[in-house]
Amino acid sequence: MSPMSDSKPKRPPSRRPSTPRIALDALMEDTAGNPIKRALWLDDLDLRLRPYLPPSLAAHARLANFERGRLVYVVDAPVWRAKLRLAAPEMLDAARSVGLKAAELVVKTTIPQPAAAPVRQAKPLSAATQKALQAALDSLRGPDGSKGRGDAN
């Protein structure tokens, strides 16, 4: 039995194990965490304003930004853009009710991602097809196995 088989790596006693929460807290204390703080704030704001959206629209709209009095939403189709614009006065009132100085509602439509084309599996070639392809390939090669006519090398 080797002396290393039963041993476990020892951790320095002064170092606590790193966890995602500790790392996130450290990042949030630094100025580098400002974009993360803003994203979390916008996500919280979206959750607070979502109940004020018309029920049919809530699944199709997401708060994208709030800056300089502009409440910016993103929707997934032009029809939802029109519906949200009609609800603009209520949404601005809702934003003001949660403490924002909202003066304008901007609605942007995202471009839907095209569906990926299904991957088709190639059908195996029949023996006759394989033989014909090999004959065609052989006809392109010279008698010594090099490329046929027009081969400059």
Image (spheres, rainbow, N blue to C red):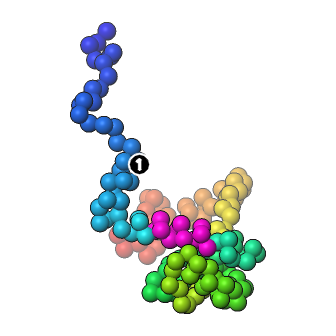
Q: Residue 125 in the image: x percent, y percent? A: 69, 55
- Which quadrant of the rendered structure holds the C terminus? bottom left
Res 60 seen here: no
- Residue at left offset 43%, top offset 62%: 146
- Left/right placement of residue 133 relative to residue 57 reads left
Q: Residues within 10 Å of mark 1 (few under 14, many from 20)?
A: few
- Residue at left offset 34%, top offset 42%: 18
Q: Quadrant of residue 47?
A: bottom right
- Residue at left offset 56%, top offset 75%: 98
- Which quadrant of the rendered structure holds the N terminus? top left
Q: Does the magenta stretch include residue 126?
A: no
Extreme-top residue of the structure? 1
Q: Which of 115 and 136 is in front in this view?
A: 115
- Residue at left offset 58%, top offset 78%: 97
Res 17 seen here: yes
Q: Is residue 41 magenta?
A: yes
Q: Nearer the viewer, residue 117 or 20?
A: 20
> 52 above or below 102?
above
- Please state the extent of the stretch shown in magenta in the rendering: 39-49
Q: Residue 120 in the image: x percent, y percent? A: 68, 61
Q: In which quarter of the image is residue 88?
A: bottom right
Q: Residue 109 in the image: x percent, y percent? A: 61, 83
Label 1 sits on residue = 21
Q: Is the magenta stretch mostly helix, strand or loop?
A: helix
Q: Is mark 1 on a helix, strand or loop?
A: helix
Extreme-right residue of the structure? 56
Q: Quadrant of residue 59?
A: bottom right
Total count of labels: 1
As shown in the figure, which amino acid type bears the numbered disc 1? Arg
Q: Residue 25 in the image: x percent, y percent? A: 36, 53
